[in-house]
Amino acid sequence: MSFTVFLGNLPAWVTADDIKQWLTAEDLVADSVKVIRNHETQESKGFAFVEAPTVDEMQAIIRRFDRAPLEDKLLRANPAQPTKGKGQPVTSAVGNDSRSAAAPIRRPKKTRDRNAEPQSAFATELAKVL
């Protein structure tokens, strides 16, 4: 069984190797990482899929990266949804979740102070590297 995390709102420069390094730095495990690119230009589309070995690891990756600041963006991380038209029923691998697996996770938009300090140790360390 596959436990896939959708990681979105990525800057165009982010590569699969960058994401693997971030996961390793946080002691998180992924079976694979795939940054989605435009077939013609090979530019990143701003999102990636991270395959986790277990549901617990998937949830840990989501907790760590969802709403983590990177540059002027907040990353998005949530369980990946199957593509439309594949004929697969939608099921949730996340236990104790009362939301329908087909319903997208929506959060109200919040304004942010662009001059604010990073909100986590991860963001602080990442800012040093950049």
Image (cartoon, rainbow, N blue to C red):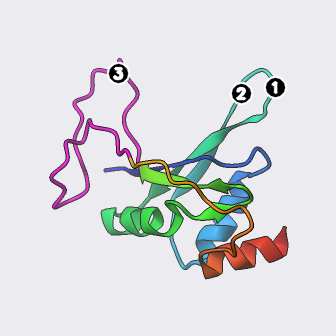
Element carrying mark 3: loop
Element carrying mark 1: loop
* Badge 2 amino acid: Asn
Q: Is residue 87 left or right of residue 50?
A: left
Q: Nearer the viewer, mark 3 or mark 2?
A: 2
Q: Which residue is mark 3?
A: 86
Nearest the viewer among 43 and 99 is 99
What kind of secondary structure does the magenta stretch mostly adopt?
A: loop
Q: Which residue is mark 2?
A: 38
In percent of width and height, residue 130 lies at: 84, 67
* Badge 1 amino acid: Thr
In percent of width and height, residue 128 lies at: 82, 77
Q: Nearer the viewer, mark 3 or mark 1?
A: 1
Callout 3 crowding tier (Cα within 10 Å): few <14, some 14–19, many ≥20: few
Alpha carbon separation for disc pair 3 and 2: 21 Å
* Mark 1 and mark 2 residues within 8 Å of each other at the beta carbon: yes
Q: Give yes or no for residue 97 being in the magenta stretch.
A: yes
Q: Give yes or no for residue 93 being in the magenta stretch.
A: yes
Q: Is residue 8 left or right of residue 56?
A: right
In percent of width and height, residue 121 lies at: 63, 82
Which circle marks residue 128 in the picture?
none
Which circle marks residue 41 in the picture?
1
